[in-house]
Amino acid sequence: MGHHQACRSPVLTAGPNHLDQDAAALEAAKEAARLLFTRPVTFLMGAVSLQTLPPYALPEVAFVGRSNVGKSSLINALLGRSGIARASNTPGRTQEINFFDLDGRMTLVDLPGYGYAQAPKDKVERWTRLIKGYLRGRPVLRRVLLLIDSRHGLKDNDKVMMDLLDSSAVVYQVVLTKTDKIKASELEQVIASTKEQIAKRVAAYPELVATSSEKGDGLDQLRLYVAQLAE
Ligand SMILES: Nc1nc2c(ncn2[C@@H]2O[C@H](COP(=O)(O)OP(=O)(O)OP(=O)(O)O)[C@@H](O)[C@H]2O)c(=O)[nH]1
Ligand SMILES: [Mg+2]
């Protein structure tokens, strides 16, 4: 530090120094978040009923959204590993609530999708009961990531899900998926309209994240959000 700087008043030097510190802190947090997602992951269990949910332990982050929106793919992409969560072209692939332990620091939860029209009615009812029961009755659930296909935006059944989360006071954050499938201008539009719609919601986290599990866009940003919730 030169003579110049030493002579400046503390007030004048506080600004830039603080910005440096903030930027350094942010970089450190990003690095820690990236690191967390390289750590060992273990599949804990798949629950097919509310009676068989695992006991409360670590903070949980749940991946929720319409069938085929990309929940399982996003979990794999965040972890940089394929095949941890089962993803597939067939809608309705994930049929139970799957719990993954991330390094004993948090639990990632992959839920069955909703809104799959071709699914047999009794199955849909069973899944709906299971998803609702889990989302309403889980004290360790720190945040729901509500996945929305960036090509489609919020659909009626997403709004029903948001109603449920609002009324259960579960904080949810919208994550747009499959951004590699649309143009940048379209993405901007869907971001703006989605933000406008979540602004009126009581339990919605105001910031959304636009992601592509395919290309990796937005994953570091999402890792940072999720890592803040780890123990
Ligand atoms: N292009 C592209 N395709 C994606 C992306 N994410 C997921 N997909 C594809 O979308 C399909 C569904 O992905 P899944 O991850 O199985 O979706 P899901 O939400 O877990 O589906 P369910 O378990 O049935 O509810 C698969 O064919 C994926 O390869 C993405 O970011 N970009
Ligand atoms: Mg799935």
Image (cartoon, helix red, strand yellow):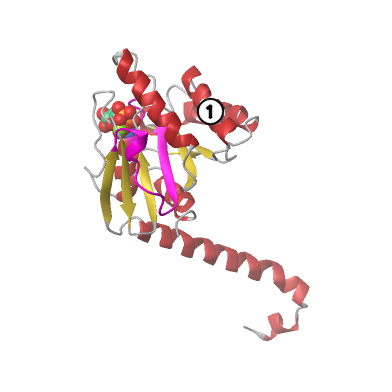
In this view, 30 is above or below 56? below
Please indicate whether residue 81 sits to the left or right of residue 167 in the image.
left
Could you say whether the residue bearing mark 1 is in a helix, strand or loop?
A: helix
Q: Which residues are magenta?
A: 47-71
Q: Residue at x 37, y 19 (%)?
A: 125
- 68 in magenta: yes
Q: Is residue 214 visible?
A: no
Observer-nearest residue: 69 or 41?
41
- x and y, in percent, of residue 101 in the image: 32, 52
| Mark 1, residue position | 164
- x and y, in percent, of residue 75 in the image: 33, 43
In this view, 17 is above or below 169? below
- x and y, in percent, of residue 142 in the image: 49, 47
Q: Residue at x 28, y 54 (%)?
A: 41
Count of marks overlaid on the render: 1
Mark 1, other Cα within 10 Å: few <14 / some 14–19 / many ≥20: some
Where residue 152 sits, quadrant-wise, is: top left
In this view, 226 is above or below 3? above
Observer-nearest residue: 40 or 209?
40
Label 1 sits on what residue type?
Leu
Observer-nearest residue: 124 or 56?
56
Q: For the view shown, which residue lies furthest in the left direction? A: 83
